[in-house]
Amino acid sequence: MADSRGYRQDLRALVKSFAMGQNTGAHVPVPAGEILPRHINIYLFGPQGSGKTSFIRTCFKALYGPRNLDANVAQLEHSLQRSDDGTSMYSVFSLTDRICLHDTRGQREYTPEELQQLKLVLEGRARPNSLVQQRRRYLLLLR
C-alpha cells in the first residue's frame, strides 16, 4: 500500500508540473522559431452516458483529492448543466494551468447535426458554457 501511495504522489507531481515540450525521454525537436502552445486541450467526445463528465470529475479528485475540489467540479454531475439525458452544456475545466479538459454533450445518433456541433467545438467556434441542443431546430450558441 505504501508503494502505491508514493506512486500516486509521483503521478500527481508529474501532471501538476506538465509543460508542453518538456523532455519526457522521447525527444521531438521543435523547429527554430516555432512556439509551442501554452497548454494542451483534451476534448472528450463519445456516446451519451459514456462517462465523459465522470472522467473529468475523477481527474480532479485524483489530482487534488476529494476534499479539495472546486465547488463547480464537486457538483459537476449534479449541476444545472445536466438534463434528463446528460450534459447539456459545452464546458471547459482547467485541470492545471497547462491542461484543459473539454466536456461535450454526448452524441445520440451521430447525425450530421451532431457531427457539425463537434466540428464547431474542435474549430474553437463554440463558446464554453453554451447550451447545446440535440434537436434540429436549435443551434449551438456561437461567438
Image (tube, rainbow, N blue to C red):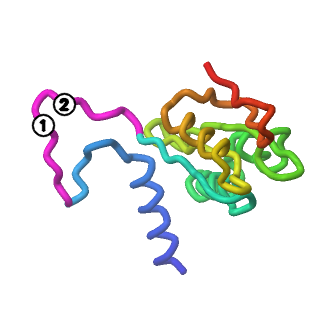
Residue that sits furthest to the top in the current view:
143
Q: CA distance from mark 1 to mark 2?
A: 6 Å
- Secondary structure that dominates the magenta span: loop
Is 139 included in the stretch rendered in magenta?
no
Q: Amino acid at mark 2?
A: Glu
Check disc 2 and report its element: helix, strand or loop: loop
- Residue 87 x %, y %: 76, 47
Q: Residues within 10 Å of mark 1 (few under 14, many from 20)?
A: few
Pointer 1 residue: 31
Q: Amino acid at mark 1?
A: Pro
In this image, 108 relative to 14: left or right?
right
- What stretch of residues is rendered in magenta? 26-39
Residue at 56 percent across and 36 percent down: it is 121
Using the image as rendered, state which of residue 116 and residue 1 is in the foreground: 116
Marks 2 and 1: in contact by CB < 8 Å?
yes
- Residue 22 x %, y %: 26, 47
Q: Is residue 88 above or below residue 141?
A: below
Using the image as rendered, state which of residue 107 and residue 2 is in the foreground: 107
Q: Is residue 87 above or below residue 48?
A: above
In this image, 138 relative to 43: left or right?
right
Residue that sits furthest to the right in the current view:
84
Using the image as rendered, state which of residue 11 and residue 94 is in the foreground: 94
Specify the label residue 34 is tagged with: 2
- Residue 126 x %, y %: 60, 29
Residue that sits furthest to the bottom in the current view:
1
Residue at 60 percent across and 45 percent down: it is 115
Q: Is residue 92 above or below residue 77?
A: above
Residue at 19 percent across and 30 percent down: it is 34
Check disc 1 and report its element: helix, strand or loop: loop
